[in-house]
Every structure is written in structure tokens, then in C-alpha cells.
Amino acid sequence: MADRVRLAFSRRARHYNAAASLQRAVAWRLARHCRHLPLPAGPMADLGAGTGLLSNALEQQRPGLDLLRLDACAALLEQGARQQTEASALASPAAAATQLLWDLNDGLPDGLDGAALLVSSFALHWLEDPCASLGQWCDALAPGGWLGLAVPIAGSFPQWHQAAAAAGVACTALPLPEGDRLLAVAAPRLQLRLATSLRFSQRGPSGRSLLRPMGAIGAGSSRAKPLGVGGWRRLEAHWPHDPDGPRSLSWDVLLLLGRRTPMGLKR
Ligand SMILES: C[S@@+](CC[C@H](N)C(=O)[O-])C[C@H]1O[C@@H](n2cnc3c(N)ncnc32)[C@H](O)[C@@H]1O
């Protein structure tokens, strides 16, 4: 994981859960799709787990599951563990979740070979080669094992791209993977139960106010050179807006749920 990205997430780790409303909503939704899956034996993990929004949602919706939280950012993993301890001190004591500090750009750890369940939300797009990583995740599943994925894809932030083009400034959004390319990796490897792209839109008084939550959770890193004050002003002036004033920002999120062909069954 690039040090710059890790540093940005680390700095905001304490504020992640309070500000990550979209991530929380998507995690809950993905967990609902996963809660009744017939799982074979094998390890289970939340890849790029951060503070564990997805693994917590899944363990709440399907008591008895125990997912490894894997992430390259120690501060987010620690924050997740701290919040879990605080929550369990209020309710009945729960066993501490298992965690692994791991860079997913190096593939998956050997311990996840033959996985029964791999889930991941809002993490794949941070990796150097999302298609290659997705292929590795599918291939690590046990026969009959499941992959549950949520990832923002290209086509997100149309308002931001439009404003930048009209203002003649760079769009500093992180480039996102193409949904079709991700599907082309998953479809030959998995029996897909769900493959759908959902649009989430947020409204606010200005473009900057809509981008602020990304910075607030440490997800504002970009490969592009940051805009100066003048660039931001031009971007804001060209941000498309509704007739009654508010601006909006939309995310396209690919939800994918698929199963590796069980042994003995033909695809
Ligand atoms: C926006 S957060 C999402 C966290 C969590 N899945 C959620 O839904 O709230 C992106 C996560 O991906 C992790 N990440 C980014 N690059 C990574 C890498 N190379 N290896 C492991 N984790 C990575 C970050 O540390 C961060 O926890």
C-alpha cells in the first residue's frame, strides 16, 4: 500500500466510523446479501476491512460467523478493535476479532487458501491492479466458497468530472476500475448470484461540501496534483446544480456476489 494512502487513512482513523455513512450503508446492504449463504468449511475474511464495518455487519446479521479483518492500515484495524471492545463492555463480553496487517498488493496470505467466504467493501479500487487482485480472490475460494464485493466503479462522480472539464482544471478523483472489466474477471470463475451497479447520490450546498466526507475518512488521496485555491474556485463555479440550488455527487457501486463452482458440479 502506498505510504501516502496509508498515512491519509491513519490520520483520520479515529473519525472513520463517524464520517463513513456511505460505506456503512453499503456494508450493511452487502452483509444482508451474504447472511444466508450456504458456506463450506474454510477461512473467512474481510479484505481491506478498515475498522470492520462490513465484518461487524455480517457478524451481527449472522451470529456465529468469525471473519479475519485484514488491512494494510494498522491505525484503522486498531480503531476497529477499540470500538469493538467498548461496545462489548456495554453488552455481553465478546471475543476479540482476529486481525491481520497485510498489503493486498502482495496477494492473499496462504492462510486464506481454500476460503469459505471472502468479502470486501470500498477497498478493491485502492489496489494497484484491481482486476488482478479480484482474480486472485476468486481463485483463493474453496469449491462452493463465496465472494461478496462492493466497489465504486468508473462512471462515479459525473458532476465532478463535468465541472472539471467545464472549468478547464484537472479532475483529481481517484481513477476507478471499469465495472465491465471486473465482471469479465469474475464471470468465468464464479457462478454469479448478483452483479449489479447501484447509484448513490448525495446532495449539498457546494461541490466542496460533498467532497469533504472523503477527506474526513482519509479517502481523499489522489494520484493527481492537488488543485490550488483558484482551481477550486473555478471547479466550484462550474459544478452542475439543480434549479433550486443544491449540488450533488453520485457514486456508482458494483455489488457482486458469486460462488466458486462446488466440486463435482459443472458450470
Ligand atoms: C474506504 S476504506 C474501506 C474500509 C472498510 N472496508 C469499510 O467498508 O468501511 C478502504 C480500506 O482499504 C484499505 N486498503 C487500501 N489499500 C490497501 C492495501 N494495499 N492492502 C490492504 N488494505 C488496503 C485501507 O487501509 C482502508 O481500510
Image: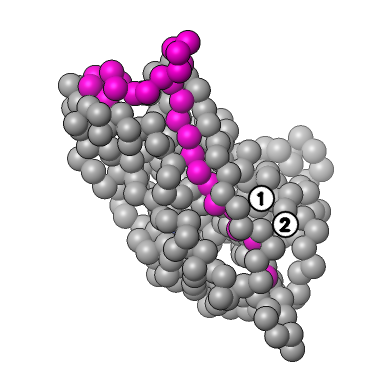
Where does label 1 land, which residue? 30
Secondary structure under the numbered disc 1 in the rendered image? helix
Numbered range of the magenta stretch: 232-259
Q: Position of residue 78 (x, y in %)?
A: 53, 47
Where does label 2 land, which residue? 34
Classify residue 47 as left or right of residue 214.
right
Q: Amino acid at mark 2?
A: Cys
Query: Residue 242 appears in which quarter of the rendering?
Result: top left
Residue at left 44%, top 63%? 181
Residue 253 among magenta residues: yes
**Neighbourhood count class around disc 1 (C-alpha, 10 Å): few under 14, some 14–19, many 20 upward:** many
Q: Tags 2 and 1 in contact by the CB under 8 Å rule?
A: yes
Secondary structure under the numbered disc 2 in the rendered image? helix
Quadrant position of the C terminus in the picture: bottom right
Q: Position of residue 98 (x, y in %)?
A: 63, 59
Judged from this view, the residue extending furthest toward the bottom is: 264
Classify residue 232 as left or right of residue 201.
left
Q: Which mark is residue 166?
A: none
Separation of disc 2 and disc 1 at Cα?
6 Å
Quadrant position of the N terminus in the picture: bottom left
Judged from this view, the residue extending furthest toward the front is: 243
Q: Amino acid at mark 1?
A: Leu
Classify residue 170 as left or right of residue 92.
left
Residue at left 39%, top 31%? 159
